[in-house]
Image (spheres, rainbow, N blue to C red):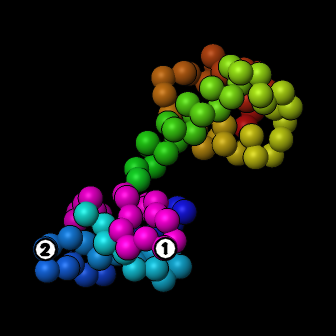
């Protein structure tokens, strides 16, 4: 699961205790203390979470879409979810917008 979180406390080892937008409290060992809020990934039953950078998430989405497109899995490229994911990943990687496929430039 992904959610935004804020720092609320620290445990006795100095590890950050965060609270997500949905009220879930977790330990976040990788929390950067110079940020007010961050994106975290976690399993709902877990007690810890991983801090995720927006840039890394966008890059991962870009790579996943490229892999699916290379396999020919994504034939109808006009699906709403596909357009949204392309938009999220647009700034990731080194492909300038003019080199993207025409149907993805207008997102």
Magenta segment's dominant SS is loop
Confirm whether the magenta stretch covers residue 41: yes
Q: Residue at x 52, y 61 (%)?
A: 2
Whether residue 4 is situated above or below residue 61 in the rendered picture = below
From the image, tell me which residue sits under label 1: 45
Taking depth in this image into account, of 45 and 15 the one nearest to the observer is 45
Mark 1 or mark 2, whichever is nearer to me: 1
Most distant residue in the top direction = 99
Image x and y of residue 35, in percent: 29, 63
Most distant residue in the left direction = 13
- Mark carried by residue 84: none
Q: Is residue 36 visible?
A: no
Image x and y of residue 29, in percent: 25, 63
- Density class for disc 2 (Cα within 10 Å; few <14, some 14-19, many ≥20) is few
Most distant residue in the front direction = 45
- Which portion, as a residue range, is magenta? 30-51
Confirm whether the magenta stretch covers residue 34: yes
> Whole-Å distance between the Cαs marked 1 and 2?
22 Å
Q: Residue at x 36, y 68 (%)?
A: 48
Image x and y of residue 97, in percent: 61, 24
Q: Which of the 4 quarters of the picture holds residue 9?
A: bottom left
Whether residue 45 is situated above or below residue 98 in the rendered picture = below
- Quadrant assignment for the N terminus: bottom right
Taking depth in this image into account, of 19 and 91 the one nearest to the observer is 19
Q: Residue at x 84, y 27 (%)?
A: 75
Q: Is residue 8 visible?
A: yes
Q: Residue at x 55, y 30 (%)?
A: 63
Q: Looking at the image, tell me whether mark 1 or mark 2 is earlier in sequence order.
A: 2
From the image, tell me which residue sits under label 2: 13
Q: In the figure, is residue 11 to the left or right of 93?
A: left
Image x and y of residue 53, in percent: 40, 50
Q: Which of the 4 quarters of the picture holds residue 107?
A: top right
């Amino acid at each position: 699961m992904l959610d935004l979180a804020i720092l609320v406390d620290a445990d006795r080892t100095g590890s950050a205790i965060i609270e997500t937008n949905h009220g879930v409290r977790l330990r976040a060992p990788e929390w950067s203390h110079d940020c007010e809020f961050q994106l975290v990934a976690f399993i709902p039953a877990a007690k810890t979470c991983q801090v995720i950078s927006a840039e890394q998430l966008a890059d991962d989405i870009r790579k996943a879409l490229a892999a699916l497109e290379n396999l020919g899995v994504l034939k109808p490229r006009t699906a709403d979810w596909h357009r949204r994911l392309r938009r999220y990943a647009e700034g990731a990687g080194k492909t300038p917008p003019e080199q993207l496929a025409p149907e993805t430039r207008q997102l």
